[in-house]
Amino acid sequence: MKFTRSYSLIEIAGLLNCEFVGDENFEVLGMNEIHVVEQGDIVFVDHPKYYDKALNSAATIVLINKKVACPEGKALLISDDPFRDFNKLTNHFRPFRSSGAAISPTAIIGEGTVIQPNSFIGNNVVIGKNCLIHSNVSIYDNTVIGDNVIIHAGTILGADAFYYKKRPEGFDQLLSGGRVVIKDNVGIGALCTIDKGVTGDTTIGEGTKIDNQVHVGHDTVIGKKCLIASQTGIAGCVIIEDEVTLWGQVGITSSVTIGEKTVLLAQAGVTKSLAGNKVYNGNPAQESRAFLKQMANIKKIPEILDEIESIKKEKINY
């Protein structure tokens, strides 16, 4: 998430009421999660295991719960609870704003676009030309939709990320200040859910087609001309490259990459990144030929057990 203007380090520290390390005029341009940070961004870290990763990331301001050596060219914000204070920043720079209309007056709707009854279009939504939004679609604030997009009934774009911190009293939610971005010529089926990014964008690439009842997690990036069949579940921070096909009920864990032109057969379970231009099957997913060979061998087990039992009897009789 980029701020609407440049802020100084002392201004941000004032918002959080926290100590800082670095020049008080140090430039702060935005805030982001570790996987998408850029120069001028704030990133937060609250566990020693991840200190080095945050301090050596592209982020130039680190919101951290311990005063440590500050790398050259960077600044620190010292907080007793970085998770809480990251939420404070999200609330400040992108707060929730209610809308009193089915289509917000701040929404921009392109020429030729049709919006069927009972749909909701939130604040600052941009929808391109010649789109068709069927009934009961909910499009949350700040969503961006390209031209020639079809979205079927009951789909929700922009719900919060499923991202929580466990506390003794329960779970604290990391607030979502990101967006959903749908490129041109995308088709989205009925009853799909596409979560917005925590600070960045969840993106569906040009020409991709999504079947009914598909879930896409926060900050996931799906490439061009992908096909995603019904009941597929994609976790957060996944990268799916161009022309990938996911058949029904595929499940993909967070923070993995699926290479271009991959095909995942029905009910495959992805637990690690997969190279492109291959067909995968099974859970955990593996190349389909190897999987089918294993299944064929498993079917032989009763026959093998019978042979072993027969050999045992022959030895006893001998």
Image (cartoon, helix red, strand yellow):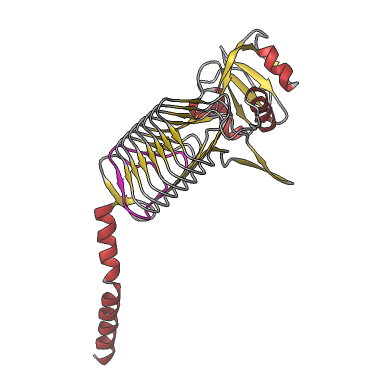
Q: Nearer the viewer, residue 266 or 27?
A: 266
Q: Nearer the viewer, residue 315 or 235?
A: 235
Residue 132 located within the stretch drawn in magenta: no
- Find residue 318 and report its horizontal and vertical position in percent: 24, 90
Residue 252 located within the stretch drawn in magenta: yes
Dominant secondary-structure state across the stretch colored magenta: loop
Quadrant placement of the N terminus: top right
- Which image quarter: residue 9? top right
- Find residue 216 and report its horizontal and vertical position in percent: 46, 42
User: Which residues fall within the magenta stretch?
Assistant: 251-275
The answer to whether residue 28 is seen in the rendering is no
In the image, is 281 to the left or to the right of 78? left
- Find residue 38 and report its horizontal and vertical position in percent: 50, 20
Residue at image position (27%, 39%) is 261
- Find residue 73 and report its horizontal and vertical position in percent: 56, 12
Say if 216 sits above or below 81 in the image.
Answer: below
Residue at image position (63%, 19%) is 69
The answer to whether residue 164 is seen in the rendering is yes
- Which image quarter: residue 167? top right
In the image, is 159 to the left or to the right of 250? right
Say if 257 sits above or below 281 in the image.
Answer: above
